[in-house]
Amino acid sequence: MALYNDGHPARERAVDRSYSCLRDLQQHDPHPRFREQYEEFLEEMMARITLSFIDSAEARPNRPTGIKVGALGIRGETKEVQAALDTPVPVATMSYSLGEEAASILSMHREVQERGKLPLAEAEAVVRSLSIAMHGDQEMILPLLQLREFDEYTTTHSLNVSVLVMALAESLGLAQQDVRTFGIAGLLHDLGKVNIPQDILNKPGKLTDEERQVMQEHPVAGARLIIESGRRLDLAAAVAHEHHIMINGKGYPHQHYPRDCHKASKLVHVCDVYDALRTKRPYRDAWDAQRVLAYIEERAGTEFEPAAAGAFVKMMRKVEGGIQLSPMPPQNDAAPARAAAQGNGAGPVSAAGDGP
Ligand SMILES: [Fe+2]
Ligand SMILES: [Fe+2]
């Protein structure tokens, strides 16, 4: 519901699906139908869940519905009631397939390819939806979708980097408005790849010099696309431009006058490399989480800003304790390093960096 405006079929489907679950529950105890109020009730719930995220201007005024919401009081406490109260309530977890968000990104990319313009409202809606999902379910912090096809990579990678950078920004105590702005920058960091031919993006072997040059144009192309799409996206444009620049000045695009990158670019850089290395690509296997975190730690101070790398590794280690990381395909331990070193560029950086 958070992803679409009033009247959108996907939104109607969500309400219908949820309403039919409710009707099933009511089968033995029929009550008056209240489909309209029910939709308003869902909106009210959504606003409550996401209040910290939604701008105050966007917050909906309380609309009275026929459904009462609030804490439940129990009168006349008996032993049974007390026993029921003492029994721990199982915690519900939600799981998200993110199919709608992935479809939204695909259509966003298509629009950029066809019209050269970014549909900003859609990008914002995807980030809002990701943030809602993140706060409802810890598992969202991890790489989200298992890839079925390689050409889905750009879509899932955008979603993953967006979620990871929002979680990282949140763990650093940034304000919600900044968290969301960083999330949009994460979502759009590789936008410049929309016009790179698939056979270069997914080439199983080493790129030629010419192909690598095409690949390495994506930061500038992305920043240009974002700037041309208009207002309020200057941070996303900066991140698109800077996300392959290392703190030692290496990486690309080449800086004629070395300067510090924006904090958001440094955070996106870490998240970008993490997600890229965790994902199986045509030119190398996926790395397991521990290995990627060790890689990030090792390169803190040369490739990554130490504070950004340290916070990211700390966050992911904490999360890993309670949550299963996405299953890894069995692999020959020596193979990924070799494949990464060959990469589709030069060295592990481009295995992580050209690929993402
Ligand atoms: Fe990139
Ligand atoms: Fe990337």
Image (spheres, helix red, strand yellow):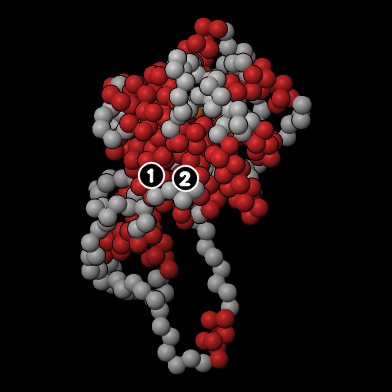
Q: Could you tell which of marks 1 and 2 lies nearer the N-terminus?
A: 2
Q: Is residue 355 left or right of residue 120?
A: right
Q: Which residue is mark 1?
A: 178
Quadrant of res 150:
top right
Looking at the image, residue 330 sits to the left or right of residue 273; the answer is right
Mark 1 and ligand 2: say if the CB distance to the nearest ligand atom is below 8 Å: no
Q: Which residue is mark 2?
A: 169
Residue 6, image x, y percentages: 25, 49
Q: Is residue 43 left or right of residue 353?
A: left
Q: Rate crowding at label 1 as few (under 14), some (14 to 19) or many (20 or more) other CA atoms within 10 Å.
A: some
For label 1, the SS is helix
Q: Residues within 10 Å of mark 2 (few under 14, many from 20)?
A: many
User: Which residue does the image show at 55% across and 91% down from the upper left?
Assistant: 79
Identity, as a three-letter code, of the amino acid under mark 2: Ala
Residue 179 seen in this snapshot: yes
Q: Amino acid at mark 1?
A: Asp
